Image: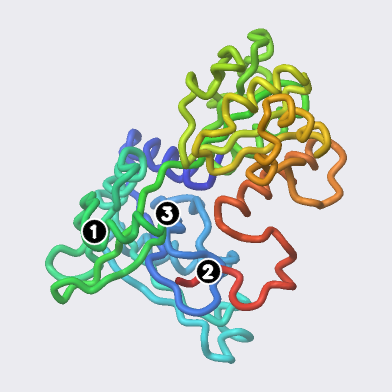
Amino acid sequence: MSELAQILDAAEAMAARGEPMALATVVATRGSTYRRAGARLLIPADGEPIGNISGGCLEGDVARIGREVIASGEPRTVEFDMTADEDAVWGYGLGCNGAIELFVEPTAGALESVGALRTGQGACLVIPLDGPSAGLHRLETYGAAAAALHDGRPRVEEVGGERIFYEPLLPPLRLLVCGAGHDAIPLVRQAMELGWRVVVVDVRQALLTPERFGAGVDFANPDPEAAADALAPDEQTAAILMSHNYLRDIAYLRSFLDRPLAYLGVLGPRGRTEQMLAEIEAPDAIARLHAPAGLDIGAERPEEVAHAIIGEILAVTRQREGGLLRDRRGAIHDLG
């Protein structure tokens, strides 16, 4: 289960029990910080916070502020600035030379945010941070909200003298795992931990069970030749072909090849994929595929192969090279 799913589930459970809470959201960062805008920490009136907004050193202070917000019923913005040299040694010790701004809202606002995060996919969550409408929530798709939706980046804009937080609520990546063999199990589990929507696809109905793959996974058993028509992939969909059956993989490949997928990978040697493409008379399509699927990390066991594939999908969908961070020039996170 992803961190966000844990926060949403916990908030809804607390609300059902009538327990107060606060929700702290990172709305802006400056310089190098551990988490980016959109990270959240759920703070119960009693008990441990849920989520993560730093390397572990801000959570205690933010929990204290959250309980003050619960008591007052008023939202608050707070900034932690670690840019001074002495802070790196004696202060919050984040190991980062940056600043982080948080919006902390009490129970009512927290539940409005939770509801928007559950149901507002495709829109932008808009929260004024100050002024007379501070803490009021709405969903928008125009103006600054449209810009945030276009590039997928949260931002704070000044509008009419108010600072307003815009957070695009994009649907999670959908992963189609075409093949329900033993090696698909760790791949599915890792994808589910990232909060992806996972569909396991196989003609062998007996293999498509929650007992094998866990709760929350969807299953489909279309004819491989018609898989794309049945599953309707789009730009928010990744697909990996790993049935270990040559004829079925050819059928899946033919079905998905011309669809607007974010990622299309094929497990196994490059030569096998080239042979399949030759049989469907599309040899030049190799440039559009990720075959062999996965990053080159020396993966051998199924769990390692799953890491390699998940890593490549993340790199491709986030437009990164997937190399070593020590070789990257500039910031770890894109700041634009």
Q: Is residue 9 left or right of residue 303?
A: left
Mark positioned earlier in the residue sequence (3 or 2)? 3
Instruction: Answer few, some or many: residues within 10 Å of disc 1's Cα (few below 14, many 20 plus, some between 14 and 19).
Output: some
Residue matched to label 1: 73
What whole-number distance in Å separates the C-alpha atoms at marks 3 and 2?
A: 29 Å
Pointers 1 and 2 in contact (C-beta within 8 Å): no
Q: Quadrant of the N terminus?
A: top right
Position above or below: 108 against 281:
below
Q: Quadrant of the C terminus?
A: bottom left
* Residue in the foreground of this view, choosing between 22 and 332: 332
Residue matched to label 2: 334
Mark positioned earlier in the residue sequence (3 or 1)? 3
Q: Residue furthest front?
A: 281
Q: Could you tell me which residue is drawn at 63 percent across and 46 percent down?
A: 313
At label 2, which amino acid type do we have? Asp
Q: Secondary structure at mark 3?
A: strand
Mark 1 or 2, closer to the camera: 2
At label 3, which amino acid type do we have? Ile
Mark positioned earlier in the residue sequence (1 or 2)? 1
Residue matched to label 3: 43
Pointers 3 and 1 in contact (C-beta within 8 Å): no
x and y percent of residue 54 in the render? Answer: 54, 66
State how the image is colored: rainbow
Instruction: Answer few, some or many: residues within 10 Å of disc 3's Cα (few below 14, many 20 plus, some between 14 and 19).
Output: many
Q: Is residue 73 left or right of residue 217?
A: left
**Mark drawn on residue 87:** none
